[in-house]
Amino acid sequence: MDPIERVGSRVVYRNAWMIVREDDIRRPDGSVGIYGVIDKPTYALVMATDGDRFRLVEQFRYPIGVRRWEFPQGTAPGTLDGEEPPPAELAAGELREETGLRATSMVVLGQLDVAPGMSSQRGWVFLATGITEGDHEREVEEQDMHSEWFTGEQIDRMIVDGTITDAQTMAAWMMLRLRG
């Protein structure tokens, strides 16, 4: 039995990238309340490596008003109400779109929950190897994006000094580092 039961739900906002809903809930003690939820499609995050270097992208993140370095990541367009592509296909597409890189191998490192206290979005983390370079296929929202190779030591320093603050990037980096 779930500790919180949804007894009603209504969409309060919707666009092509998210649905915001307000759920009427009943707690285990019988008390009622509301819960706000942001529904977003599954995303893939890709850690492309050519041995001792990893590819990051930098872009302006409008909600926080600053540019940030992170691993390539994203969702498939138009999947809020429909079928999502398989995670490895989504990962390959995001890598190609944002960096132009192609990989011969995509290994799943694990799954991440973005902000489980308010969002249903979950993501898959992939390690991409067997890299070849090509042209990127960025969306219009990504026109200011650029990408570069960094060593593991540089990424560690970027996390420590606050250059990298993206939670998914840091969690994915931890997954990789703990694998040994």
Image (tube, rainbow, N blue to C red):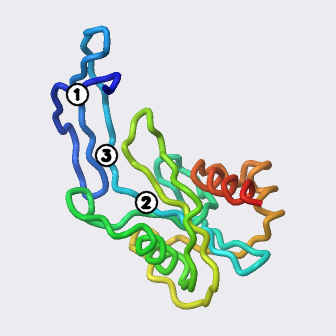
Front label number (1 vs 2): 1
Name the side, left or right, on which 135 lies relative to 77: right
Cβ atoms at labels 1 and 2 below 8 Å apart: no
For label 3, the residue is 39
- In what element is the residue under mark 3? strand
- Residue 24, compared with residue 176, is above or below; it is above
Which residue is depicted at the point 24% across and 31% down?
22
Front label number (3 vs 1): 1
Q: Position of residue 75 (x, y in %)?
A: 39, 63
In three-dimensional space, the C-alpha distance between marks 3 and 1, rounded to whole angstroms, equals: 15 Å
Which residue is depicted at the point 33% across and 41% down?
38
- Residue 144, compared with residue 61, is above or below; it is below
For label 2, the residue is 43
Name the side, left or right, on which 58 lies relative to 21: right
Name the side, left or right, on which 175 lies relative to 66: right
In three-dimensional space, the C-alpha distance between marks 3 and 2, rounded to whole angstroms, equals: 12 Å
Label 3: how many Cα within 10 Å (few below 14, some 14–19, many 20+): some
For label 1, the residue is 6
- Residue 159, compared with residue 29, is above or below; it is below
Q: Quadrant of the N terminus?
A: top left
Tag 1: residue type? Answer: Arg
Tag 2: residue type? Answer: Tyr
Most foreground residue, 149 or 163: 149
Q: Position of residue 163 (x, y in %)?
A: 71, 54
Q: Residue furthest front?
A: 1
Q: Quadrant of residue 24?
A: top left
Of pointers 1 and 2, the one earlier in the residue sequence: 1
Most foreground residue, 33 or 62: 33
Tag 3: residue type? Answer: Asp
- In what element is the residue under mark 2? strand
Q: Position of residue 164 (x, y in %)?
A: 68, 54
Label 2: how many Cα within 10 Å (few below 14, some 14–19, many 20+): many
